Amino acid sequence: MREKIYIFGAHSRAQTLAVYLRALNPEIEIVAYLYDNEERNPLQIEGVTVERIRSHLRLHKEYPIYLGIRGLYHERVIDKLRALGFKDIRPVTVEMDLQLRNQYLKQYFFSIKQRFIKMEDLQAGIETSDSKASATIYVAKSIFDRALQKEYRLSLYEKEIQVGAALTEQRLYQGILTDDVGDNISERNRQYCELTALYWIWKHAKEDVVGLAHYRRHFVLAEDWVERMQEHEVDVILPTPLYVAPSIEGNYKHRHDFADWEYMMEYLKETQENIYQEAQEFFAGNLYSPCNMFIMRREILDEFCAWLFPILEAVVIHGGQKKDAYWNRYPGFISERLLTFYFVRKSADYKVVYADKNFLV
C-alpha cells in the first residue's frame, strides 16, 4: 500500500528530501509540494504539482507532511499547518537529514558496487602505534561571524585561525593564529572565504595530517581518529556527501552566477583537456562533499592545492568582483565542487573515507 505524503517546500532542500524518501521507501507517493510565501517556485517537480497553500485548496490533512525547509522557519510553518488541521507534521531537523542522507548513501554506493566507508566504521586495534602522526584541524573563524548561542569547546586537535586578518586590525583574542602571516592571500577573504585559511595551511602547516573546519561546522570524530586513520591507511577524510538537484552543475548555476561556472569549465577544457570529460560527467551527477572541509595527509594537500588555486585564480581574474556579497564568494563555492571532483578522480590513488559534521547555532 502506497504511503501518501506532502512535502512543505519546493527548493533544493525539499527536492533532496524527496530523493532520499523515495529511494528508502519506494512505496511513498508525494502528492504535492506546498509553500506559503511569495517566492518564485516551479509549477511542477518531476511531475508532482507545486501548490501554494490557500483557503480554497483542498488538502488531505491526514497525510504526513515533511518540512523540507530551513530550520529557522519550522516553528512558524508548524503553527500554520496545525491551524489548518494537519496532525502528522515531520520537521526535517539536521539530525534527521543526516540520518536519511547516510541511509541513502549506503544504498546508493551499494547499487554502484562501491563501498561507502565512514570513519566511525573503522575500528582501532588494541595496540597503539609508538609513532603517532602529528595532526591539526584548523578551524576558520572571522570577526564578522555571529556569536554561537552555546559555547563550543575545541578538541585538542583543533586550532582556530582568524581568516581575513589582513582586512582588519581587530583580533578575536590575543595570540590567535592568523592567515596574514608569511605567504598568504588573507586580503582576498571576502571572495575566497575559508580558502584563505587553506592557502595558509598549504604554505605554512608542518603537521603530518592537516584539516580544515569552520567555527560552526566541525567533523564528528572519535578521540582516536588519528590512530584509526593510520591503522587503516586512510589518506583523506571528507564530509558525508550531499545530494543536490538537478545536478552539481545545475545546482550551482541556479544558486550563483552561471557565467563563472561556464568559464571554469572552459578553463579546464583548455588547460587540462585530459580530465575535461571526467569533469563534465562528474558535475552532471548529484553528490558532492560541501563546505571546503577535509582532513588529509600533508603531501596530498600539497598536490591538491597546487592543482586548485591556479584554477580559482583564473576564474577570479575573469569573473572579477561582484557587488552582492554572497555572489562575490563564488571562488569558495566553486572550490567545494572541485575538491570533491579531485578526490573522486584520485579514488584509485587515495583511500578516501567520510565523516559526519555538526552544525552549531
Image (tube, rainbow, N blue to C red):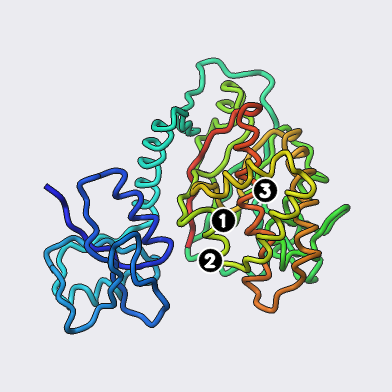
The structure residue drawn at horizontal position 57% and vertical position 63%, both measured from the top left corner, is 253
Residue 284: % across, % down: 54, 49
**x and y, in percent, of residue 359 in the image:** 48, 56
Please state which of the two labelled residues, at mark 3 or mark 2, is closer to the viewer. Answer: 2
In terms of image quadrants, where is residue 66?
bottom left
Q: Quadrant of residue 204?
A: top right
Residue type indicated by callout 1: Glu
Viewer-proximal residue among 159 and 277: 277
Q: Label 3 is placed on what type of residue?
A: Tyr
Among the two numbered marks 3 and 2 on one chain, the one whose residue lies closer to the N terminus: 3
Q: Residue at x 18, y 84 (%)?
A: 55
Q: Who comes first in sequence, dot 1 or dot 2?
A: 1
Mark 2 — residue?
Answer: 254
The kind of secondary structure element at disc 1 is helix
Marks 3/1: CA distance?
29 Å
- Dot 2: within a 10 Å radius of its alpha carbon, few (fewer than 14), some, or many (20 or more) residues? few
N-terminal of the pair, mark 3 or mark 1, is: 3
User: Which dot marks residue 249?
Assistant: 1
Q: Residues within 10 Å of mark 1 (few under 14, many from 20)?
A: many
The residue carrying mark 3 is 138
Res. 331 in view:
yes
Three-letter amino acid code of the residue under disc 2: His
